[in-house]
Amino acid sequence: MALVLDPAAQDLLFREARTANTFTDEPVTEEQVQAIYDLIKYAPTAFNQSPLRIVLVRSPEARERLVQHMAEGNQPKTSTAPLVAILAADNEFHEELPALFPHFPQAKDVFFSERGSREQAAALNASLQAGYFILGIRAAGLAAGPMTGFDPAGIQKEFLDEDHTPLMVINIGKPGEDAWFPRSPRLDYGDVITTV
């Protein structure tokens, strides 16, 4: 076999992992979230820019404010998941570059002085980090329910600011009863990979 990762870990992270639609009421602890972050923070981004910012929605009052901005079909699962995370791109990430990219601190001004280029880079690289975050949730033995069905302007106004662009909302917890839809098909290798 070409993969060195243990088959059980492959199943946990990929083959058996699914988007959960229901959850148990078992809490997701701060220690679990810290462990997830401590794992995924090493994943690569361009210039090590690390623009992902995460808002954990724990209080009932904040949950109620969030649910009203979710698409109708996402409201029930968001209102009942043990933990909900709002994932956003920090469009002012370049302010951290002198510390995060110390061998070329000028990258802050050379490449990211324009807001438009920062927004594009932040969206791409924070989306990469969001994928890593989902894998980290799975590595913690939890299920993730990522969603993009929400009112971005409403969530930005309610939880963020004009320098942070919401990317997705993720419900997190142990999967509940009837958590999974049937597995959808995937494209074959030859449909995706081209050799030139």
Image (cartoon, helix red, strand yellow):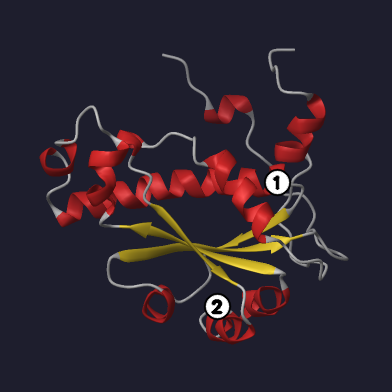
Is 37 or 147 nearer to us in this picture?
37
Alpha-carbon span between mark 2 and mark 1: 23 Å
User: In which quadrant of the rendered view does residue 84 lie?
Assistant: bottom right
> In the picture, residue 185 is in which quadrant?
top right
Q: Above or below — where is 124 with respect to 103?
A: below
Q: Is residue 87 left or right of residue 133?
A: left
Which circle's residue, 2 or 1, is located before the other in the chain?
2
Extreme residue toward the right, this view: 177
Q: Is residue 41 left or right of residue 108?
A: right
Q: Is residue 99 above or below residue 9?
A: below
Horizontal arrangement in the rendering, residue 21 relative to residue 104 (left or right) = right
Q: Is residue 60 above or below residue 109?
A: below
Residues packed near mark 2 inside 10 Å, few (<14), some (14 to 19) or many (20 plus) = many
Q: Pointer 1: what residue?
A: 138
Q: Which numbered dot is residue 70?
A: 2
Residue found at x 77% / y 39%: 12
Residue drawn at x 37%, y 46% is 124
Measuring 81% from the left and 71% from the top, which residue is drawn there? 25
In the rendered image, which quarter contains the C terminus? top left
